[in-house]
Image (cartoon, grey):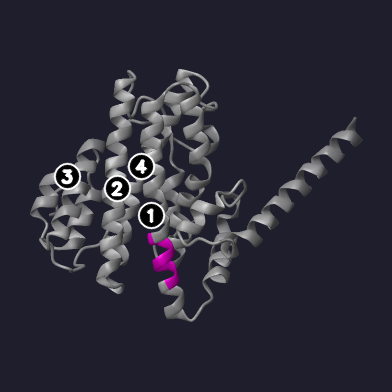
Amino acid sequence: MIAAGRAGAAAARSIAEACRAVLLTTDPIEKAFAARAVARRWRQSGLDHRFDVVMPDDPPRPDQPELLPPNRMPKRGRAGSERSRLAMLHALAHIEYVAIDLAFDCAGRFGAAMPREFVDGWLGVGADEAMHFVLLDRRLRALGSHYGALPAHAGLWEAAGKTRDDLTARLAVVPMALEARGLDVTPMTVARFEAAGDARSARILTRIYTDEIRHVAVGTRWFEFCCANDGQPPAERWQSLISRQFRDIVKPPFNDSARAQAGLTLDYYGTLAALTSSGQTSSRREREGQNSTSG
């Protein structure tokens, strides 16, 4: 039986066992340190490149935070008050907590069919996400709060469930859509924290933003690798996968510069974003027309 936490990471012999140990770890800080330990062992050639156990479809979660559907989450505000900044930092900490699992699940679930460098990339991403979580949790504690003090939404891991059998879809959705959305909104969030005089939080978010460009690049690289192997045009394949269930997460404003640094060029998302914007405009006009008629 595979143990969880740092003990499981130390006892694992294969990379799959080590990834599973991280996924089975519930305590957030223990998960973060286990993730860093696994990445370090892998870099030092301390784990066999062997995929001999399966990844859990639904990793265990701590009792706190309470997980809610996205539509039941309280509004966070725009970082104008200390309360809204705490809520925003907590939300980001939860994203990083789940992102640890997303990275290690990707390596452990799909690594057998991919080159060794695929595991290198995702374990590096997972180690970054673990550090991001620790930085945010420490900042929350310095401000008198902690991870788990507020509810969080359960939508992030749903993307993993919907793509558990399709690596190309996982890459299209998680790094190239969800994480890419972070590239779009983080600079504005940083500016709001700076305007509120919270320079320390702003520096943490800037570090995360810089790392996330690299994470999106890892996803884009392996997405294009899969498309090349399948003889499919990458941009068209991405648009097809996203338009099925995830179109609503591709919306302006876009940070075209950061996306381009990650290899996610406009030919991927430009057409789909235009269609989404057009649909939103049409819906708004229909509602306005109905309101004027009913009045």
Q: Which residue is denoted by mark 2 in the rendering?
A: 128
Task: Answer with mark 4 or mark 3, whichever residue precedes in sequence.
Answer: 3
Q: What residue type is labelled 4?
A: Glu
Task: Answer with mark 2 or mark 1, whichever residue precedes in sequence.
Answer: 2
Q: Which amino acid does label 1 sit on?
A: His
> Which residue sits at x=44%, y=63%?
220
Task: Answer with mark 4 or mark 1, whichever residue precedes in sequence.
Answer: 4
Position of 239 with respect to 119 (left or right) is right
Assign a secondary structure to mark 3.
Answer: helix
Q: Which residue is denoted by mark 4 in the rendering?
A: 96
Residues in magenta, as a range: 218-224
> Which residue sits at x=30%, y=73%?
113
**Which of the pair 287/40 is nearer the observer?**
40
Circle nearer the viewer, 4 or 2: 2
Q: Is the magenta stretch mostly helix, strand or loop?
A: helix
The CA span between labels 4 and 3 is 17 Å
Task: Answer with mark 4 or mark 2, whichever residue precedes in sequence.
Answer: 4
Q: List x then y, in percent, for residue 174.
A: 44, 55
Q: Which residue is denoted by mark 3 in the rendering?
A: 5
Q: Residue 289 carries which label?
A: none
Assign a secondary structure to mark 1.
Answer: helix
Position of 192 with respect to 274 (left or right) is left
Q: Which residue is denoted by mark 1 in the rendering?
A: 215
In the rendered image, the quadrant that contains the N terminus is bottom left
The answer to whether the residues at label 2 and label 1 have Cβ atoms under 8 Å apart is yes
Q: Which amino acid does label 3 sit on?
A: Gly
